[in-house]
Image (cartoon, rainbow, N blue to C red):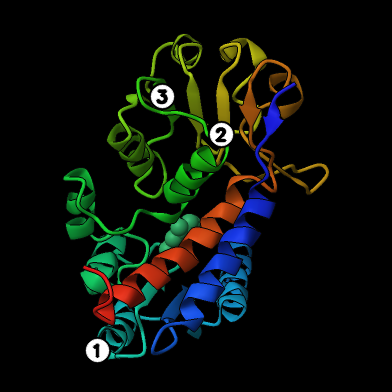
Amino acid sequence: MAVILDGKALAASVRAEIREEAAQLPRRPGIAVILVGDNPASQLYVRNKVKDCEECGFFSRRFDLPFDASEEELLGILSKLNADPRIDGVLVQLPLPPSFDERRIIEAIAPEKDVDAFHPLNVGRMVHGVSPIWPCTPAGIGVMLDAYHIPVDGKICVVVGRSNIVGKPMGLLLLSRNGTVIYCHQHTPDLAAMTRQADILVVAAGCRGLITADMVKEGAAVIDVAMNRDPETGKFTGDVCFDEVKDKASYITPVPGGVGPMTRAMLMRNVLSLAKLHMGLTT
Ligand code: GUN
């Protein structure tokens, strides 16, 4: 039976540390969160982010724009936030409605306030290993691996999924820790042959039941990023068949209660990091 990585408890302790550190600063770290449209999942995520800010003692502003808001309206808000000295981090909740050019919006966030590290300048810094922050989900997984003393150096790491938000930066983070990284995606011819090699398997495909026990190496660390809603029960499930894989892996994350809470905690940590940079306390 694998050790279950308790993201909920770890995230709570990370938030407590952040709150303590933030209280020592000359001013409150600040974040602006912008939601366009009424996607229920996004609304829940944004509500939670604002709640986390309160717990950490941060200043936060929330902007809600209607589904049919114009790109110019959003760009106008971003331009004001870029110039607002109370705001250290700006987050536009993705996905945006299809009428928006997501790339144009991400590139309109000042790189020094890009709390997701999605701006191409920050992605370039990440590739070069000089970014002060990482996107929240990979960062949270990195903290979890550290907390449970799961080594990456010299290990085979398989990442299933290649999104800009999770898969791609996840592979870069593992590479920066001297892992040997294999990216898998919909065009990978024999997924099981790849996943069976993994000492560390990170799955972010959004495909319920994708990873079965026969696809996992004995003793692997299995990290499930997905949040799929079971249409019958309405409950959240990951991409990994938890009940069968837990008996084969050494470590496994539950869904919910694994990666999700860590992603949220890392947003707070990224805001704190950017705030310290803006206050001249770090370089
Ligand atoms: N939508 C899903 N995950 C994320 C995230 O980490 N950041 C933003 N901005 N939007 C998201």
Q: Is residue 160 left or right of residue 39?
A: left
For the point 63% across and 67% down, the residue is 44
In the rendered picture of this protein, how many numbered marks are placed on residues?
3
To which residue does mark 3 refer?
A: 157
To which residue does mark 1 refer?
A: 83
What is the distance, in whole Å, between disc 3 and disc 1 at their CAs? 41 Å
Dot 1, how many residues are within 10 Å of its Cα: few (below 14), some (14-19), or many (20+)?
few
Which quadrant does the N terminus fall into?
top right
* Residues tagged 2 and 1 counted as in contact (Cβ below 8 A): no
Residue 42 visible in the displayed image: no
Which quadrant does the C terminus fall into?
bottom left
Give percent across and percent down for residue 132. Answer: 28, 59
What is the distance, in whole Å, between disc 2 and disc 3 at their CAs? 11 Å
Judged from this view, the residue extending furthest toward the right is: 233
Give percent across and percent down for residue 134. Answer: 35, 53
To which residue does mark 2 refer?
A: 223
| Residue 280 location, quadrant | bottom left
* Type of amino acid at the residue the image marks with label 3: Cys
Lower position in the chain sequence, tag 2 or tag 1: 1
> Element under label 3?
strand
> Element under label 2?
strand
* Type of amino acid at the residue the image marks with label 2: Ile
From this view, report whether residue 174 is shown above or below residue 119.
above
Give percent across and percent down for residue 164. Answer: 34, 47
What is the distance, in whole Å, between disc 2 and disc 1 at their CAs? 38 Å
> Element under label 1?
helix
